[in-house]
Amino acid sequence: MKFQFCEAQMSGAHLSGAQLSSIRNKRRCENQLDKELTYESSLPPYEPVHKYRIYFLHELTSLEDSNHLINLSQHRKCFAIDTESNYGSNDPALIQILYIQPHDVESPMLLVEVQFLPAISSFTFIKIQQLFQSIFRNDSHLFTWSDIRRELHPFTIYDIFSMPLYSYFHHVQGQFKSWFNQWIKKYYSLPADHIDKDLNDIIIIDAPTHDPTLLLPTQLMNNKKFYSGETWSLQDAVVYTFGQYLSKRETLRR
């Protein structure tokens, strides 16, 4: 046993930092795929409550769409933003921006494909820069799940915006963690006939039928997240709040 342990240590010692990082990333993705399968087989798919229209921003974006989006963004102050990296290389790949509007108004959803942007000297590229300037204004409110400043920094190499940003940032992940802990504690402290209607928005998963490391009962999951300092993923938050499955399968395939 001692020999095997030393051999394993020596084997690991010959791996470069990049190789070790690749192994960890592969394991993380495998775990995420396991979770995808568990959620997909147990829960209905997530249904957005907002109407939206997708606009792809790349080298073929039309002048008409660019002008429409710039004009609209100049009259809006609230946006939700997220990013995605390439699955294999972890290079910056996608910026997602949703214009936050009333429920009955169709909201533009921008998918900025940074690997397929037009030439910097082109008029289309200048329009995309202008669009980002109108969204990342000083008086804009950007709602994000994670630390979007850190996520956006690698995208600055594409010159469609520059850092630092002086918009108002709202870190929803941290707010959700406190809110969920508060409401779950209230839920379990009340008798069944006194449950507030607002609490019915929360799904109570009492007995997982799958791997308990992937799908915990609601109270255990809350305690795990709240007291360990572990963050909530958006996918987990949707599962435990709405009882729906937010797929990341397409992201994992990139």
Image (spheres, rainbow, N blue to C red):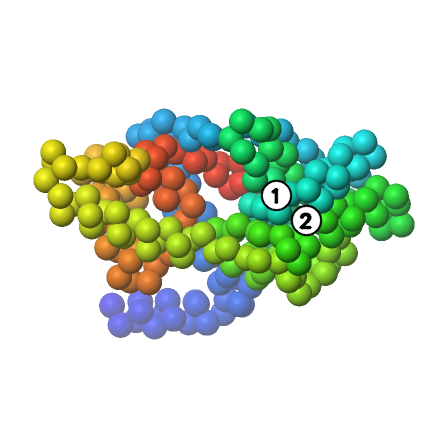
183 is higher (above) or lower (below) than 164 = above
Cβ–Cβ under 8 Å for marks 1 and 2: yes
The location of residue 152, given as percent across then percent down, is 62, 57
Amino acid at dot 2: Ile
The location of residue 62, given as percent across then percent down, is 81, 32
Q: Which mark is residue 97?
A: 1
Q: Is 155 in front, or is 88?
A: 155
- Residue 34 appears in the figure: no
Mark-to-mark CA distance, 1 and 2: 9 Å
The location of residue 32, given as percent across then percent down, is 41, 45
Tell me which residue sits at (75%, 39%) in the image: 71
Figure quadrant of the C terminus: top right
Which residue bears the numbered disc 2?
A: 135
First reached walking from the N terminus: tag 1 or tag 2: 1
The answer to whether residue 114 is left or right of residue 10 is: right
Tell me which residue sits at (48%, 56%) in the image: 171
Q: Is 27 in front, or is 173?
A: 173
Which image quadrant is residue 197 in? Answer: top left
Amino acid at dot 1: Ile
Q: Is 234 in front, or is 137?
A: 137
Q: Secondary structure at mark 2?
A: helix
The answer to whether residue 10 is left or right of residue 222 is: right
Tell me which residue sits at (88%, 45%) in the image: 122
Mark 1 Cα-neighbour bin, 10 Å: few <14, some 14–19, many ≥20: many
Mark 2 Cα-neighbour bin, 10 Å: few <14, some 14–19, many ≥20: many
